[in-house]
Image: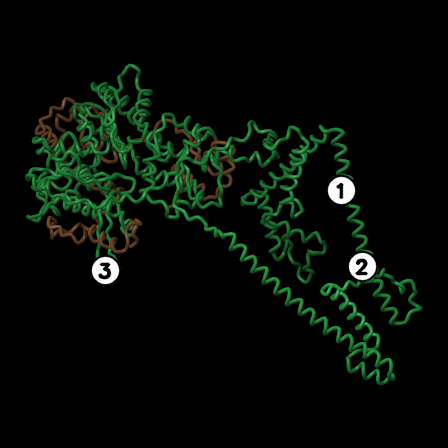
Chain colours: A green, B brown
Amino acid sequence: MPHYTVPIETQSGRNSPKPSPAHVYNVSDPPYRGQLETDASGYRSSTPETAIVIDNGSSSVRAGWQTDALPRLQFPPMMARYTDRKLNRKLTFVGSEIYFDGTARGQAKNLYEPGSNIINNWDVQEGILDYIFIKLGIDGTNGVVDRPVVMTEPLANLGYSRKTMSEILFELYGVPSVAYGVDSLFSYRQNEGKTGLVVSSANMSTHLIPVVNRQPLIAHATRLDWGRSQCSEYLTRLLKAKYPGLLTSGKVNETQIEDLVRSHCYVSQDYDQEAQRLLEWSGLEDRDHIVQLPFQEKEVVQKTEEEIRISEEKKKEAGRRLQEQAAKMRLEKLVRKEQELEYFKQLQQQIAETTKKEARLLLDEEEFKDEVALDRRIKEMEKSIRKQRNKDVGDLEEEPEEPPSYPLLDIPDEELDEDGLKQKRQQRLLKSNHDARARAKAEKDAEKARQAEIQRLDDARREADLDSWVEERRAARSEVIQRIKERDRLKADLGNRKSQASQMRMKHIANLASDNPLGRKRRRGGNDDDGFGADDADWMIYREIQQGRNDDDEDDEEEDLGAQLKNIESQLLKFDPDFTEQSTQEAQKDWTKSLLHAFARGPWPFDPESARESNQFHLNVERIRVPEVVFQPSIAGVDQAGIVEIAEDILMGRLSGHSARDDILKDVFITGGYTLFKGFEERLRNELRAVLPADVQLGVRRAKDPLLDAWKGAASWAREKERRQAFVTREEFAEKGGEYIREHNLGNVFS
Amino acid sequence: MAPITTASNEETHAALLDTLDMYKIHKPFRNPNWKPPQRRNKNLKQILSEAQRAQQSMLNTQQNSGATTPTPATDGTNTPALNPNPEKMSQDLGRLVLEKNAKQSNGISTPMAGTGFTGPSVTYTSIAAAPSLKPKKKYCDITGLPAKYKDPKSGLYYYNAEIYAVVKSLSTTQVQEYLAARGANTVLK
């Protein structure tokens, strides 16, 4: 039954075509940045008090001397360690240097547990520290790293992680002292923050830490488990679902997805509105970003005209030769046949001249039954020779068209001998054959006339009353459409095991397969035949249980419905003034109107044959959908409050009675890689403004360098003499254990 | 050993491999007697459950022995309402002394010491954001547009009738794939 009717007229015409895409993006190359140089100058000019500052981040590790303005080393926290079978040696690569080689890239392990800010792979950590110390030129004269280390750690770092890190630093490298601090607080310090809310949206997680008078209120700090690396993961999932098979082909790797997130995504100011607007036709070509994956175009061999001509000639030549050979053979055959005929004719003459007995002998020799057979044979041969000569040699000897005569048929059986009866039977057969053919021809002519008559009547009716004719055609059209729909629905129903159609089908199959159909018990000694097949209609059951069978009996209906619709529509197009190209069924499936097409293929036609186009993916809604998660974690299945709700909870709930709350609001400080998305700051400001009371002042600012300020802050912090008290010495480590830290205003608290 | 850049050939690649290798470089600053503890790579779940077990056993022994150190007076200024985890507030005197030391040595007077610096209750799990209290907005699982409808059979949200046709044509695995993107998929254990 129709749930809705398709309007014959679409609202507006087909959307106007777009020029071909102006810019197609490519996926990035592996980010191999060359070998980092070993630079011992910093080490030589340092004193034993000069600290090595390490921002142990998850997107990249930054390291350098406290005296440096910028970190000397920056590299991803990756290490590849494997044994090369061919060279038979162990190899270790660290940082971006893993990207120079395919195997190394494949073997690379990340320092962090995927999706969390917890260090999970301590072998990688050792490799990274080795790398840092070597590149900083530490010569290890005393067998130790004889410089203090300042290191960042996640907020509320786990005791186990810190313990293991301290063990490595003190026991493996023998550093004199270590200080730990939280990266976002270092960043806040670098940006001269005193009282405010630090919103650090980084690679692995997002933290909000209220700070009052340079003292973090760690008890009120909150972590949201979403960062830029989770964005890449999310985009991968979305694209896998959007373009099945495209990402699994190994053409896109993690760093490329990360790069896509970085360069194409932005934070929308109003997600709901913008997502819908994003797929609108006008301007879609600008909003839709095409990313082209490497592909191999199917090779079409282009021949020059000369080559084509030559090959054709060759073909012709070969054909001619074959023809000639065949003609020669036929001619030889013809000659042989003629000789044979000559011989048989002589034989006939001989027979006529000799006695009966001798004739008998001659006939037997040639394996003929009697003279009649010989006669027939000669006649046959003459006929075939004539035919062939007509064809080949072109001797035009019109074959006399014998009007079929059946003289024997009129003679009653009694007057005929045995031979005559046989011939009569033959003639009757011939006659009935001939008659049947004539009948069929007549029928065909009649059908043609009937069709012409129908056409004529139809035309006449149309000319007489166009309106009712059109009405009728439209009704027919909608009926066909309805039937197509029903057929599709039935097909879909059969796909569903629980639908009535497929349940019935299963029942039939079970019945046919069972030994005693219809549950009837076989009576002992009785007749166990259930009479299946007695009625021809019984066999229809096998057609019915065929998969994908359609409801009507006609098998070829499937293609027929489409053809019927086409036919009716072409008639309507011809005669109905209101029925235009756009109202045909095909035009209504117009891709320029399809939301799905706009989503998956942008405003351009899609050719599934083209290797180029099937290796593209289009980023449109994803561009805002991916970074949106930090504001609405539920859309990626993270069961946590969004960044604004957390801020609201801290500022309006937990700190509502705090004397410094208004001061905190004046300085909402954002840092970390996630804040590099365009529009992040603005969106956070607008949304915070919306949830805060109207009379409070709100200030939102971003770190000068959201990526490097953490390291810079740590370095400048380490430069201050009085900070040395916050370092844990090796003696303290031995005495108080690996989890021990000295608390300071930029670090975690000891628990 | 496939070079990734077209600029390099076998030979230069092997040379590059040799220069970049960190394994062969002598690292004199490493303690040659260092043996890393076995199975030190633990995931977050393992670490958390171990920490919890350790804490539990410590609490038990403290309660049984009655050796709990009385809460010092400084802790009394804490407003319980501000502390999200009052029961976790361990009464570890050593820690408090330490905290005091740190503050004194840092030379920072903390006017908010009573209100904010509650200390030991802060753990990795305690600072995780709580579930949202606001109604979740629903978005089309396929296109990401705001969704008004939900297919009762597959549980997918969809934007309009055109997308519904797609939803209906999806196989079970595809449906699960879409659901997994928002963490609503069925996970068999």
Specify whether A435 is left or right of A84: right
Alpha carbon separation for disc pair 2 and 1: 27 Å
**Which chain is disc 1 placed on?**
A
**Which chain is disc 2 placed on?**
A
Q: What number is the disc on residue A307?
A: none
Label 2: which secondary element: helix
Where in the figure is residue A662, as x and y percent of width and height? 23, 18
Alpha carbon separation for disc pair 1 and 3: 85 Å
Label 3: which secondary element: loop
Q: Amino acid at mark 2?
A: Asn
Label 1: which secondary element: helix
Vertical order, A613 against A316 (above or below): above
| Quarter assignment of residue A746 | top left
- Whichever of labels 1 and 3 marks the residue nearer the N terminus, that label is 3
Residue under numbered circle 2: A433
Vertical order, A523 against A29 (above or below): below
Specify whether A594 is left or right of A96: right
Where in the figure is residue B96, as x and y percent of width and height? 12, 31
Q: At x 61% / y 62%, what residue is drawn?
A: A319
Residue under numbered circle 3: A88
Please tell me if label 2 and label 1 are on a single chain.
yes
Q: At x 31% / y 44%, what residue is drawn?
A: A29
The residue carrying pointer 2 sits among few (fewer than 14), some (14 to 19) or many (20 or more) residues within 10 Å by Cα, namely few
Residue under numbered circle 1: A451
